[in-house]
Structures are given as structure tokens and as C-alpha cells.
Amino acid sequence: MPETYVVAGANLAGGTAAATLRADGFNGRLILVGEEPVAPYERPPLSKEFLRGEAPFEKALIRPPGFWEANEIECRFGSRVARIDPGSRQAILDDGEALRYDKVLVATGLRNRTLHVPGSHLPGIHLLRTVADADAIRAETAGATAVVVVGMGFIGSEVAASLRRCGLDVVAVEPLPAPCYRALGPQIGAVVAAIHADHGVKMHFGESVDAFEGNERVERVVTGSGMHIDCDAVVVGVGTTPVTDLLEGTGVHLENGIVVDEHCRASVEGIYAAGDVANHLHPLVGGHIRVEHWQNALKQGAAAAKAMLGSPDPYDEVHWFWSDQYDTNIQSAGHVSDWTNPLIRGDLETRSFVAFSLRDGRIVGAVAVNRGKDLRRSIALIKAKAVVDPAKLADPDTDIRSALATA
Amino acid sequence: MGEPVTLCPADAVADLEMKAFAVGPDHIAVARIGGELYAFDDTCTHAACSLAEGELEGVTVVCPCHMGQYDLKTGEVLDGPPPDPIKVYPVYEDDGKLMVELD
């Protein structure tokens, strides 16, 4: 009797997992279920080239049209796994259909947090997660002159940059002291703020939103300190929560997402998780981490598929992500929980530098601004967990690879 | 193959180095790896970054912006976000100069 595998989540992680299952020889029934009515696509362009109208949606598809059918992957796009019943090994869809599974991969990703303030229901206030969201923002901002971006995390920062490039006036409201503050800390955050200021974004840090006001639609944002900011539209990027509802009450360990071991296995047999939703025991980090980035969705999706097929290899990629804002390329590698006192290679002022976070003389994470080659070389050092020579690391004219302290 | 084009003096690209050249409207990169020369499109097919600004790892070039990886023997994408391969071109030394043959 051939086995049935179900993948819940037709996104980069889930789609890559399904493709990997087939590529690595799974010949049973394979069902890919996804809430959006479209084939799996990559989300990075949604805040950048797609939002600016520079690239068609087709370029974001993770596989060419026809791939899924050709690989006998049953696609249920526009459908959702509402719950999983591990006892009877069934994935129950939102229309009631029950899919019996031998193994199920949960790659349901995230949903956006919303602001619960007066007026948050008004038309003209947007979140950004899906291509439909991006289409709505594009349609609305085409006729707009002023947009408020609430939340200057990576998504908010990229949206602000894209809308500036499209010629709109952008005002940003952010409760923390700098853009991308949680991931980049105060020093690099200040550099990102300066880049946005140079491009004409008006930013209000340490500022919350008290209300949205307008008659038929949003016309202004009222902030915690009492500012009234007029606008034609609003984009809200205030964080996310992992989508785990389908596993509530199943006994699967849920804590900051779905807790999985180094092989992407959840605490109940036959259930795996990958991508943004998975809180993964990372061998390099020595603890559980949940990562909401492109590379992890891609690599962990593939790793989970291989684990489902019996691979003994743990998933131990060095986490990495990028953010493009205007002409600035920001990349981050490793896992940094504290950006106090980073070691800087290069020059913050000229916006060409790498910031390293060191622990016990070893690099645990690095952020590069316009220094991608250095970042690439840093990854090998993070992976090696080797003690480094801080003086060599800090000198931009010395090859990072030579910073390995020789015994 | 088109006419050979002179890019630079042969010693302008050292071992384990890359350099980019403008040839008419095209941007062509040349890498020297263990004595072998490789010529390829300098522009990454993902976000148009210059591959010569990136990293050589074996006979693979890694884009500096988003870590797209290409096999320099074939131009194939090995990893990362690039949607399409890059073109590769015949390249050789002739009379102390680096010559490339574009399509």
C-alpha cells in the first residue's frame, strides 16, 4: 500500500518540501494544501520589485507552471488544513474533507498581527503578506500621494523604500528607537534610519498609533503623542504570529510555533514542521529558534522532506537573510540575541561595514551593509565555531578568512 | 562565435580573482581559478548585482547580494534565488592579452 504524505502550506517551505519529496524518490500519494488560490511563490519581491511594478508575479513562482501536475503532486490551492487528528492520522480541510496521511508536514507560516485601535477597520489600511495584499497596496497607492507606514521592521522598511521610489510621500511611525531594531540593534538601526532619512522618509520613533480616522476611508493617523498625520493610505507591519491553530488540542508541543527537533520532527509521531512556523532545535545555536526568512523556508523545507524520507542528517544551516532598501544591501547571518557592543569592520558612516556579534571569542552572528563578500566569508567562521582574532576581523583590508586564530 | 575581443593584459586578473569588463552593452566577468580562465555574464539574473564583486568557491561564483550561486563551467544555477543561468564564454590568453569570444 503506497503511503500518503500531506503538506499543509503551499508556500516556499511547503512547496520546496513537496518538490524535494518527489525529487528524492517518494512515489506515494502527495497532497499540497495551501490557503492562497495560487501556486507556491516567493514573498521577498512583494515588498520590493513586485510592489514597485518592476517584476511580474510569474517571476516569483518557485516552480514553473505545470511542474506540480507533471510531478503528480495533488494541489489543493485555495484550501486550508483546518485541523490535524493524529489519532486517526487525518488532515481535515476547511470544507470538511478528511485526508488520511502517513506523514504530514506543517508549513503554515505566519499571519500578520493587526492593530486593535479605533478606526483599524477603515478602508485604505493594509497589511502585507500575500500577492493579493501587494496587489491591493499597488492599486491603492497608484492614485495616492501620502502613505503612512506603521512599523519599521524589515517589511515596513522595505515598503517605505519602495513607495518612496514610486514617488510617494512616506511617513513612518515606529514604537522602537530605530528601524529593524530587534534584528539589528541600535547602532546598525541608526544607519538604516539615516538611509531612509536621506531618501526623504519622515520617521517618528518611540511613537505608537492611537487611532485611524476618516469618513469613508482612512484620512489620518493619530499617534500616542497626539500627532495627526494626514494620508491617503496606510501599510501596517507590526509583526506576526505563527499559524498553529490546526494543531491546537492535539498534544503536539506548541511554544513560539511548533516545537521540532533537529530533524524537523514535532512531538507527536508522523508530524513534521518547517519554515516560519517551526521552532527548531538548531545544533549550531544549541537551543530552539524560529526563523522567519526566505533561506530558512527553502532549506528547512527541503531538510524536512529528507527527514520524512528517513535521512539521518540534522538541519544545521547557518541562518541568513537579506533586505534591500533603496541601493543598500543588508545581509545578516547567524543568530544574534544581543547587539550590545558589536565589533565593526569598515565604516558605519560610509555605509560599508560588517558588524560582528562575538561570544567567547567566536562569531555568533554578523550583519553586513553593502559588504556581501565579507558576509559570505563570515558564514564559514560562524559554522566553524572557531575562535577569531578581533584585530584582523576589524581591519577591512585583511581577508576575513585569515581571522581564524591559529593554534 | 563572434570576433575575439581584447579585455586587458593577461596579468590583470590574478589567480583566485575576478574582474568585470564593459564590452559594448555587455558586462563580462573573468575569473582565474587554479590557472584556468572562465568568462561569464557579470550580471546576476536575480537582482542584477555584479558577480565579480562576489566570492569564488571552487569553480562556483557566489553573488554578493543574495548568495545566488553559478557553476562557472556551464553557467547553471547551483543554489539561491536566481531564476535563470548566466552565459559563459570562451576565454584565453593570446600574446599577453586576455581574449574573450562573445556570441
Image: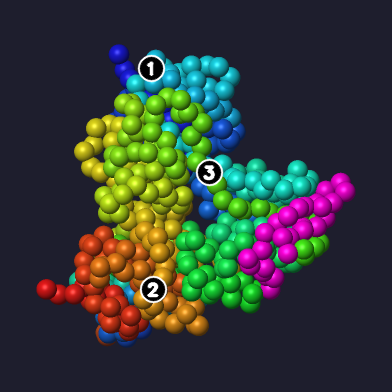
The image quadrant that residue A379 belongs to is: bottom left
Label 1 sits on residue: A87
Q: Secondary structure at mark 1?
A: loop
**N-term mark: 3 or 2:** 3
**Amino acid on which disc 1 is placed:** Gly
- Residue under disc 2 on the same chain as residue under disc 1: yes
Residue A181, horizontal then vertical, whole percent: 52, 64
Q: Chain of mark 3?
A: A
**N-term mark: 2 or 1:** 1
Residue lying furthest right: A215
Residue B75, horizontal then vertical, whole percent: 36, 58
Magenta span: A200-225
**Amino acid on which disc 3 is placed:** Thr
**Front one among A335 and A392:** A335
Decide if residue A215 is on the left or right side of residue A279.
right
Label 2 sits on residue: A342
Does residue B90 appear in this view? no
The image quadrant that residue A390 belongs to is: bottom left
Decide if residue A153 is on the left or right side of residue A333.
right
